[in-house]
Image (cartoon, rainbow, N blue to C red):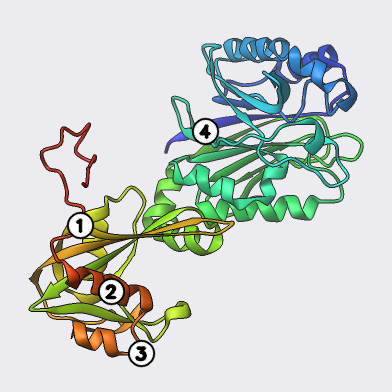
Amino acid sequence: MNKVRLTFVQMDIEKDQFQKNKEKIRTLLQNADPTDFIVLPEMWSVDFDFKNMKNHGKNYDKPLQFLQQLALKHDATIIGGSVPQQTGDKLFNTTFIINPTGTLQGSYWKMHLVSHDNLEGQIFDRGDRIPRFFSSKASFGVTNCYDLRFPEIFRGISLNGSEIIFLVAQFPEPLYQHWITLLKARAIENQVYIAAVNRVGKGYFGHSLVVDPRGEVLFEGDQSENLYQISIDLDRVKQEKEKRNDLSIINEHAYNKWVYPHNFIGVGGLMEVEDKVLMVKQNYGRLKGMWLMPGGHLDKGEKLNYGVEREVFEETQIKGEATDIIAIRSNSTEAVVDCYIVFKMDYIEGTPVPDGFENTDARFFTKEEIMTRQDVAPLAAEIIQYYFEDKNRGFKERKDFASFNDDYTLYT
């Protein structure tokens, strides 16, 4: 059993009353048992005191020093709720993470800001980082209140290897059912512990929560100011993922292309054997039923030549070696830049076999057949015609070039 002790400070917060809020935390913690983590609610220092928020942000060093004192006194990692922090000309809703030694490990700037009938999105700047933190007991991530409605940030934290995701919040009434449902969903989706601290007081319902990797509620607080201490077993995270690791089958390529489009690189292989070119019959999209060269999109971090060799084999079961770059096509839209790079490929071995998914047929065609068929994609026909006009044209890999590392490749 890998036991981790959590301490939640569930409290009401007085607006623009840093000293009173600080003393309340001290009082709630005075009889606390030894713990590994102490977690505070969002904006514990001054509440959402919007009219004075920029001034509070300039003085963030005061609540930071208090958090460091707490860490030293209790020999615990502090998940510092959140406080306003001025950084240059930007103002962030910031969660500080303090080591048991009192040193600042790092911070998280709230990414998702409430903007519907709320000044938060107007006053604060939104963060753009998803950091990973560590203690002697666990790797963990931090989220803040409204982040709960955006599963992507939780997925990003869990993909980075975190075992616990903390949430600091001022989640208001009447959203208790949303609170419970979403916290359980985030735990189930990512197979991690979710540890959430909410404030109490007028308009807020508390009910700080711990949810295990299966979505079972291990602890739920009430609506009063209180100090809660809970123990969890981190071995449960490993055990659940050994049974069925949902994160291991995420199709990032499909998400990047269809859910969250971003710039991506496509590759194609022009493989000629005895004056015939390998082609596949597309089975999806606007080119469904058309013949084109085998290829696809690079996986994250994949080298160009490795990517095209992999794609050609997956689509046709033919092994080849990528050599020269013979064509580059770029296509820009408002959402993405789509670059397509075609390699000349040397045949190694194999007989064309369609994959039955992305294509329904795979075979070799002569140049004449390609030029006269009506079901050949125009781009493929253009590149193949260009290739046969002068087979020696193309950018070749410069193996004599003094590269910076093994993954650096120059084509000229």
Question: In this view of the protein, which residue sits in the foreground, 199 or 345?
Answer: 345
Question: What's the amino acid at mark 2?
Answer: Met
Bin the neighbour count of mark 4 within 10 Å (Cα to Cα): few under 14, some 14-19, many 20 and up. Answer: some
The nearer-to-camera label among 3 and 4 is 3
**As drawn, is 205 to the left or to the right of 3?**
right
Bin the neighbour count of mark 3 within 10 Å (Cα to Cα): few under 14, some 14-19, many 20 and up. Answer: few
Disc ID at residue 394: 1
- At 18% from the left edge and 77% from the top edge, which residue is drawn? 277
- At 43% from the left edge and 41% from the top edge, which residue is drawn? 161
Question: In this view of the protein, which residue sits in the foreground, 212 or 139?
Answer: 139
- State which tag comes first along the sequence, 4 or 1: 4
**Marks 1 and 2, how far apart in space?**
17 Å
- State which tag comes first along the sequence, 4 or 2: 4
Quarter residue 35 falls in: top right
What residue is disc 2 on?
A: 293
The nearer-to-camera label among 4 and 2 is 2
**As drawn, is 325 to the left or to the right of 55?**
left
